[in-house]
Image: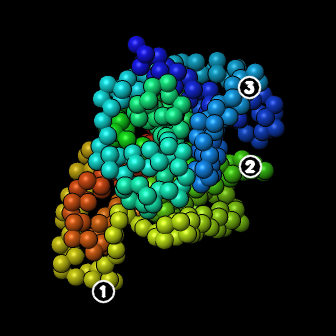
Amino acid sequence: MIEILNILYLLVVCFVMFSFPLNNIYIKKKLINYNLGIFEIYSANILFLLTLFLFSSFFNFNIIYLFFTIFSFALLNLFFFDWKICKKQIIPLIILFLFLLSYSLEISTYPYLDWDASVNWIFKTLNFKSNYGFENLKNVPGYVGYPHLGTYLWALFWKASFIDYEYTGRFVFIFIYLLSFFTLVDNSKISTINKVILLIVIITICFDKILLYGYQEPLMFSVCIIFVTLVEKITNKKNLYLNYTLLIFCANLILWIKNEGMLILVLLNFFILFKKQITNKIKIILFSIFIALILIKKNIFLFYFGQFIFGWEGYEFIAISDFFSFEVLQRLPFLIYQIAITIVKYPIYLLFIACILISLIKEKNFIKNLDFILFFLFNISMAMAIFYLTTDLSWKHHAKVGLDRILYQTSGVYLIFILRFLENFIFNNKKN
């Protein structure tokens, strides 16, 4: 009973904390160029607060004081809360809460930590829970070169729990994960009942136990969805400073969740590159800022730990002259096989391939969907290249346990195209 009450308390904490600061009647009056729904506001607040938590993680703050400071401001914000916007989405909010509750109960029933979580992420989490700083990460077990944002968030909510169990800190991952689906569907121009059906279907087909076992991939999955959703929302209106600010925050967070975030960010730039509503000047500015963020992260790791690794510890690239040697080319059949298994494992990929083929046949317009096509092709190529281009003799083992997780992180992006396809070819046809 105590554990159930603690779960309910932490879920309420998530709803209250991440409603701050944008869901405020006075702040919203200033955002005259933006028509934000409740789930978009929550996504924006997540980006703001995660950026604040990332900044705080480099200083030796007592995280429980940080938690109560932010939570106190969020509670005060309830007096200036725009409750009307919540009433319009009462049914989706109830569904969100029910999914949150069921997933949280599942974690509490089976508080299991899988491989990476048990040998890497949990020790970083314990470091921050014990109020040690970022530079002390070199003294804890696991790979020092792994980013730490998810573990700081984990420690923060674990510390805020009434019960001292590590799994309580993982509820926030579920909250962010599920919220990304609601943000995505909320942008669709379809009826509420169709949105509800879509939400239940996509949350069901996207479920994977990786969400429950302490991995950081679900957090990356969510932030990638939010990134592309932000790009999709950009219009020809002027003074869209909030959109671009959130994009920059989102790009930076991607870098601090997983090592491969650097490559994922490069791939996500396809959506900015092909977005006609973004001027060339803004594109150059955004790309320059993203490069600067990568360099800043690199220099921080070099300064504190004397290393900046890509992939796993000890990862090194093979020589260019060996790219097409027979010994290395022999890896291709196995990697292609692993890609095929992954595509079958995650139905999003099968749905995306089907939707893109039908769309190309119906519209006969390759250029219209070029951003998603290129993202898909380069995404698959990137995942294969990580294991194809390494000197590590254990590349096959790493591919078996890691290739599917790499592709899982970006799979949520394809939901955006799938929903667009359903909106254009299914729901609009029914309406007509």
Please tell me in which quadrant of the rendered image residue 100 appears. top left
Crowding around mark 3 (Cα neighbors within 10 Å: few <14, some 14 to 19, many 20+) is few
Image quarter of the N terminus: top left
Query: Toward the viewer: 285 or 390?
Result: 390
Q: From the viewer's perspective, is the residue at label 2 or at label 3 nearer?
A: 3
Residue 113 in view (yes/no): yes
Q: Position of residue 363 (x, y in %)?
A: 46, 50
Residue 283 in view (yes/no): no
Residue 240 numbered mark, or none:
2
Left or right: 87 with respect to 372?
A: right
Q: Which residue type does callout 2 highlight?
A: Leu
Q: CA distance from mark 1 to mark 3?
A: 62 Å
Label located before the other in sequence (1 or 3) = 3
Which residue is depicted at the point 63% across and 36% down? 65
Which residue is depicted at the point 27% across and 75% down? 391
Residue 321 numbered mark, or none:
1
